[in-house]
Image (tube, rainbow, N blue to C red):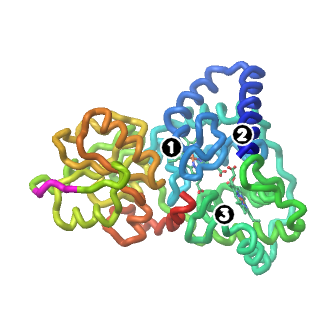
């Protein structure tokens, strides 16, 4: 506990020093504002990570020193499909123009180390050895090929398409202080590190998840035009839910209400790019960062249920906004979209979209 406090104090002191040392330019300022609106909810107000959904730090010095702008751009614009990290780029249906992505990168880089060229090294290791090392040392945080755990899902195809062998090797050698990703140099031999990275690379068996809008969807519009009704089963009986902690409803109860043709609204709180790829059948797109998307939801006592990937965070923001506006019956769908998908409940997905990684177990959320 005390260690955490000291660490927090040290971090905030470092933050202040950084602010005083570098006068911020207009680009950084624009990035700061876009970051505050879109990213802080998960990555934290100063991008130190872990505000929600086990979102990683975007500020750790070892990360900034090895991540190129191209890597950051791809992460932000294309997201990490199958995780809570949406594609924020306009081209895929997200809210950010390329120049705004660059402004966010400038903000993230402010005061941090510039990217360093990584020394070339062996890019081939022993997969069998690597697998044993991974299972013994890494799986408890990074999960398996098909299940995310508490840390970045290393099998994600966009990560593995955009991260070089040297980037991954450096991350393992140097860790990501001050996070729980410790440096493994010393604990593992250089050859073992190469083996485990080779194994991590081999986990990308599903290249090319189509993180693109389906044909017909208009890319680049900040809000998606509605393609179906807002209220499901408008002539049905009102839904009736007893909420957990006055806030949560389980996926099973929502499915039951749909089967009984109850009247309700399902609101997808994620970025529209995520909605385009995969949503609960009948859900409307109401991105957490744009409250105008709630304007056409009737405020007449009809239940409005919001969900995200996370399972709770940005859906909670949508529910808070609805409650502020006086909506009587609102709830967060507790387990989120991936649990819904993994139960085989009805979804709408881009043709060819491969199943997302299973959601982390509750203890890791
Ligand atoms: C709903 C929560 C959420 C929001 C909002 C969000 N992120 Fe993320 N982000 C995540 C998660 C979770 C991951 C890790 C995904 C994984 O498991 O691979 C991530 C990963 C990343 C990465 C890759 C980091 C790495 O080490 O590989 C970058 C870069 C990033 N986010 C930037 C942003 C920016 C910039 C924004 C705002 C435009 C943003 N994120 C908004 C949850 C979020
Ligand atoms: C105690 C939990 C834990 C263990 C064990 C662990 N990691 Fe990590 N790892 C993390 C976390 C958390 C992050 C993200 C840190 C951050 O916020 O920047 C991370 C980041 C990484 C990254 C950087 C990914 C990126 O996109 O930036 C790589 C690569 C990685 N770990 C590989 C490994 C390997 C290989 C092992 C086993 C030798 C391992 N990790 C063991 C928690 C762990």
Residue at disc 2, secondary structure: helix
User: Where does label 3 land, which residue?
Assistant: 141
**Quadrant in the rendering for residue 48:** top right
Find disc 2 in the rendering and name its residue.
5
Q: Residue at x 56, y 34 (%)?
A: 35
Q: Which residues are magenta?
A: 236-240
Query: Residue 202's spot in the image, x, y percent?
Result: 68, 72
Left-right relation of 303 to 114: left
Q: Classify mark 3: helix, strand or loop.
A: helix
CB contact under 8 Å: marks 1 and 2: no
| Distance from Cα at disc 1 to Cα at disc 2 | 36 Å
Snapshot quadrant of residue 282: bottom left
Q: Earlier in the sequence, mark 1 or mark 2?
A: 2
Q: Which residue is pictured at 23% across the width and 38% down the height? A: 296
Comparing labels 1 and 2, the label whose residue is closer to the camera: 2
Residues at marks 2 and 3, CA–CA distance in whole angstroms? 23 Å
Task: State which tag comes first along the sequence, 2 or 3.
Answer: 2
């Amino acid at each position: 506990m005390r260690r955490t406090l000291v660490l927090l104090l040290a971090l905030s002191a470092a933050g202040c020093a950084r602010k005083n040392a570098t006068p911020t330019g207009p680009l950084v300022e624009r990035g700061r504002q876009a970051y505050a609106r879109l990213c802080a909810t998960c990555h934290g107000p100063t991008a130190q990570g872990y505000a929600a959904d086990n979102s990683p730090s975007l500020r750790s010095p070892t990360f900034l020193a090895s991540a190129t702008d191209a890597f950051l751009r791809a992460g932000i614009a294309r997201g990490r499909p199958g995780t809570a990290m949406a594609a924020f780029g306009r081209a895929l249906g997200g809210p950010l123009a390329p120049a705004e992505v660059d402004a966010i990168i400038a903000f993230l880089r402010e005061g941090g180390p510039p990217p360093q060229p990584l020394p070339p090294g062996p890019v081939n290791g022993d997969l069998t050895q690597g697998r044993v090392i991974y299972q013994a040392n890494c799986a408890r945080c990074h999960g398996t090929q098909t299940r995310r755990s508490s840390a970045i899902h290393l099998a994600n195809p966009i990560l593995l398409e955009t991260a070089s062998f040297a980037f991954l090797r450096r991350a393992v050698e140097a860790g990501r202080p001050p996070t729980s990703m410790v440096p493994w140099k010393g604990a593992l031999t250089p050859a073992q590190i190469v083996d485990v990275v080779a194994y991590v690379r081999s986990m990308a068996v599903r290249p090319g998840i189509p993180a693109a809008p389906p044909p017909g969807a208009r890319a680049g519009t900040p809000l998606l035009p509605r393609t179906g009704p807002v209220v499901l089963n408008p002539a049905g009986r009102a839904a009736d839910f007893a909420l957990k902690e006055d806030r949560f409803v389980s996926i099973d109860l929502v499915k039951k209400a749909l089967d009984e043709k109850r009247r309700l609204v399902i609101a997808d709180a994620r970025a529209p790019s995520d909605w385009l790829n995969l949503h609960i059948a009948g859900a409307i797109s109401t991105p957490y960062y744009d409250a105008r998307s709630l304007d056409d939801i009737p405020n007449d006592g009809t239940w409005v249920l919001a969900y995200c990937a996370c399972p709770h965070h940005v859906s909670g923001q949508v529910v808070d906004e609805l409650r502020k506006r006086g909506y009587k019956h609102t709830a967060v769908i507790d387990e989120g979209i991936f649990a819904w998908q993994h139960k085989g409940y009805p979804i709408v997905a881009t043709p060819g979209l491969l199943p997302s990684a299973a959601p982390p177990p509750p203890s890791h959320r």
